[in-house]
Image (tube, rainbow, N blue to C red):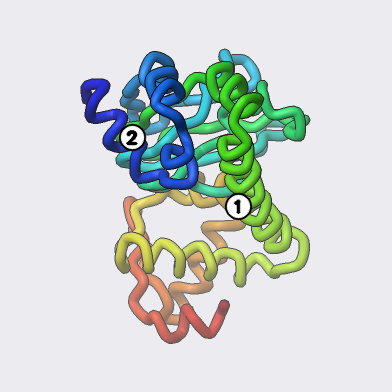
Amino acid sequence: MNKKEQMEFLSQYEDFWGHLSDEEKEFVCHNTEYVTYHPGQNVHSADLRCVGVLFVRKGCLRVYIMSEEGKEVTLYRVNPGEVCILSASCVLSEITFDVYVDSEDLTEVVVLNAFAFAKMMSKNIYVENFSNKMKAIRFSDVMWTMQQILFFSFDKRLAIFLYEELIKNGPIIRYSHMEIAKYLGSAREVVSRMLKYFEKEGIVLVSRKEIEIVDKKKLMERL
């Protein structure tokens, strides 16, 4: 993807691109790059440099937090056409906790480096508004995740996860039990036990490499 193609891609983000002057667009041009991340690659963490704002073109990013013991809780995922702004947390004073970002698939992004984005926020009120809007959207996602963890039973949380995957990718879900446990902030054994129960109830069919949803109606009754 050349610079012209990058700019054409960014132009779809009207709340951002549509309020830039020609000079600011030129500034963006000199401070963005096209990057491809491999499945499972760590994109952002406390130990890495501050990446910047990630405009996802293809694939999917997973944003999560991690305990000192290494337990992961997925906060949300960033899909094509969406923006990952917490990867620029070093220039966002409101973000005071460490977040991690991994690539789930082969993921293509256009990256606006963090300090260029910070400079633009300080000079253009529309860019600042764009930043605040993105943070508000992701805060809502995080609160939904916390609500599930704190107030929902595990069978309902697993049902929500399976239903969202069904809507997104169809009835065949190709995640390991360990990967699902990371998404839900649980243990692999708990996931395996609940999937076995769902299988007994005729909701899913579990094999070594995939989970097939065989009764959507029964699954929805668990939501």
In this view, the residue in front, 11 or 149, is 11
Residue holding disc 1: 137
* Percent position of residue 53, x then y: 51, 30
In this view, the residue in front, 38 or 88, is 88
Verify CB contact (< 8 Å) between mark 2 and mark 1. no
Q: Which residue: 41% across, 31% down? A: 40
Q: Left of 145 or right of it: where is 150?
A: right
**Vertical comparison of 131 with 90: above or below:** below
Q: Left of 150 or right of it: where is 168?
A: left
From the image, which quarter does the C terminus lie in? bottom right
Q: Crowdedness of circle 1 by 10 Å Cα count: few (<14), some, many (20+)?
A: few
The reply to whether residue 186 is in sight is: no
**Dot 2: element:** strand
In this view, the residue in front, 24 or 144, is 24
Q: CA distance from mark 2 to mark 1?
A: 21 Å
Q: Which residue: 56% across, 45% down? A: 182
The reply to whether residue 110 is in sight is: yes
Task: Residue type at mark 2: give it.
Answer: Thr
* Percent position of residue 129, x then y: 62, 42
Q: Which residue: 60% across, 65% down? A: 157
The image shows a total of numbered marks equal to 2
From the image, which quarter does the N terminus lie in? top left
Q: Left of 90 or right of it: where is 78?
A: left
Asked which quadrant contains residue 25, the reply is top left
* In front: label 2 or label 1: 1
**Dot 1: element:** helix
* Residue 177, disc: none
* Percent position of residue 56, x then y: 38, 38
Residue holding disc 2: 107
Asked which quadrant contains residue 90, the reply is top right
Q: Which residue: 34% across, 53% down? A: 174
